[in-house]
Image (cartoon, helix red, strand yellow):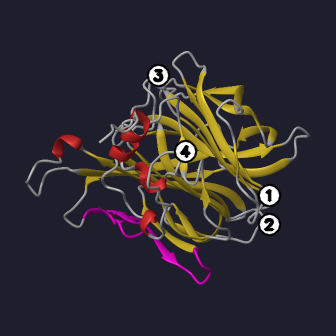
């Protein structure tokens, strides 16, 4: 038997054939839903990530909830029921745009014992009384997500319903994140999710209210990998934007320690039925325009940026400066993640979504 080429041998060993076109692994297997909405416990790192913006109490709010699953390799051979083979983490945050305030909370637990679970059959992730659960709805491939999180001083009780097909990032769901073949992830997005339900602040339920045509929209990312980050990468800048015309824009860079770009990518889907335009690794640039320094950690973040990509030139403006999350009690990272407004070269808002800035308080390490 001939030895497999190094690239293909790694991909098959990693199990990434689950989202690879034939150029990466033989035989190929397309992503299969609802199975691939669920957990992939053989992979080292996985997350389900929903961000959004909504109208409540007459003003604009941003929110995010993320469930992380991490495979603990050293515990895989242990036979005890108490062995922490899989860890689950969760972060939730609520941005009060009018009040210029961020509320956030976090959870961590080992999987099992009815406390923390991530189903392999479909999206159904739970950590104590926090949950994210998907249900199919009438249209083929459509989803309705239930979001529940009772945090220390706020709560999320939201439903996010798909209005568009899934968006497979990269090449049929395989997203390259660096110069090495192993710097890849399976990456599925669901933009333009319609929001309903309520948030709760200071014990007061605030129902989602009707707003403009692009209010009350959310974005979901589901991503899993074994070695997403190159050793030279310290973190990333990323945006996921629901465009006002119904499109979806993703752009990201992975940074070196000197601030230079190690890798970049992204995509544009101009409308629900438009083809996905993928961006090459040399076609995306993030240029900082304004920084904010956290009084809590001293970390300096580029919260206003010019973004150049094949879709055009845009400026991302943070709607609240202080949207830093200190997750040292769970995932261990300090990062900035917040609601922003995307504007064109004329200064007109063309979308809203989230900017994520990692690796500024210290190199980010996954897995």
**Disc 2 target residue:** 213
**Disc 1 target residue:** 244
User: Which of pointers 3 and 1 lies earlier in the amino acid sequence?
Assistant: 3
Q: Which quadrant holds the C terminus?
A: top left
Q: Position of residue 345 (x, y in %)?
A: 88, 38
Label 2 – label 3 distance at C-alpha: 42 Å
User: Which of pointers 4 and 1 lies earlier in the amino acid sequence?
Assistant: 4
Whether residue 79 sits left or right of residue 205 in the image: it is left
Q: Is residue 46 above or below residue 231?
A: below
Please name whichever residue, 337 or 227, is drawn nearer the observer in this view of the structure.
Answer: 227
Mark nearest the camera among 2 and 4 is 4
Q: What secondary structure is marked by label 2? A: loop
Q: Position of residue 203 (x, y in %)?
A: 49, 65
- Residue stretch in magenta: 115-142
Numbered label attached to residue 175: 4
Mark nearest the camera among 1 and 2 is 1
Please name whichever residue, 186 or 355, is drawn nearer the observer in this view of the structure.
Answer: 186
Label 1 near label 4: C-beta < 8 Å?
no
Mark nearest the camera among 2 and 3 is 3
**Disc 3 target residue:** 232
User: Which of pointers 1 and 2 lies earlier in the amino acid sequence?
Assistant: 2
Q: What secondary structure is marked by label 3? A: loop
Label 2 – label 4 distance at C-alpha: 31 Å
User: Which of pointers 2 and 3 lies earlier in the amino acid sequence?
Assistant: 2
Label 1 – label 2 distance at C-alpha: 8 Å
Label 2 near label 1: C-beta < 8 Å?
yes
């Amino acid at each position: 038997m001939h030895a497999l080429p190094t690239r293909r041998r790694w991909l098959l060993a990693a199990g990434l054939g689950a989202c690879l076109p034939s150029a990466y692994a033989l035989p190929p297997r397309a992503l299969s839903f609802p199975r691939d909405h669920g957990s992939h416990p053989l992979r080292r790192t996985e997350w389900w990530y929903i961000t959004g913006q909504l109208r409540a109490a007459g003003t604009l709010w941003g929110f995010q909830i993320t469930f992380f699953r991490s495979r603990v390799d050293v515990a895989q051979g242990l036979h005890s029921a108490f062995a922490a083979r899989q860890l689950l983490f969760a972060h939730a945050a609520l941005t009060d745009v009018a009040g210029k305030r961020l509320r956030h909370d976090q959870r961590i637990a080992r999987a099992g014992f009815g406390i923390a679970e991530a189903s392999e059959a479909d999206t159904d992730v739970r950590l104590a009384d926090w949950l994210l659960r998907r249900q199919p709805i009438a249209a083929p491939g459509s989803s309705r997500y239930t979001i529940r999180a009772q945090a220390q001083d706020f709560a999320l009780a939201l439903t996010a319903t798909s209005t568009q097909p899934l968006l497979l990032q990269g090449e049929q769901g395989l997203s390259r994140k660096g110069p090495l073949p192993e710097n890849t992830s399976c990456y599925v997005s669901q933009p333009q999710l319609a929001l309903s339900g309520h948030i709760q602040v200071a014990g007061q339920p605030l129902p989602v209210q009707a707003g403009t045509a692009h209010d009350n929209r959310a974005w979901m990312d589901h991503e899993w990998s074994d070695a997403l980050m190159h050793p030279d990468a310290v973190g990333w800048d990323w945006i996921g934007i629901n465009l006002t015309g119904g499109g979806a824009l993703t752009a990201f860079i992975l940074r070196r320690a000197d601030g230079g770009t190690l890798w970049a990518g992204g995509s544009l889907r101009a409308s629900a039925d438009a083809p996905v335009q993928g961006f090459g690794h040399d076609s995306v640039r993030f240029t900082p325009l304004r920084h904010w320094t956290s009084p809590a950690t001293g970390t300096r973040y580029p919260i206003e940026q010019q973004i150049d990509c094949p879709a055009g030139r845009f400026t991302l403006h943070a709607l609240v400066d202080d949207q830093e999350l200190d997750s040292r009690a769970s995932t261990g990272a300090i990062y900035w993640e917040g609601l922003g407004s995307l504007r064109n070269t004329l200064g007109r808002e063309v979308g809203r979504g989230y900017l994520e800035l990692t690796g500024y308080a210290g190199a980010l390490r996954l897995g």
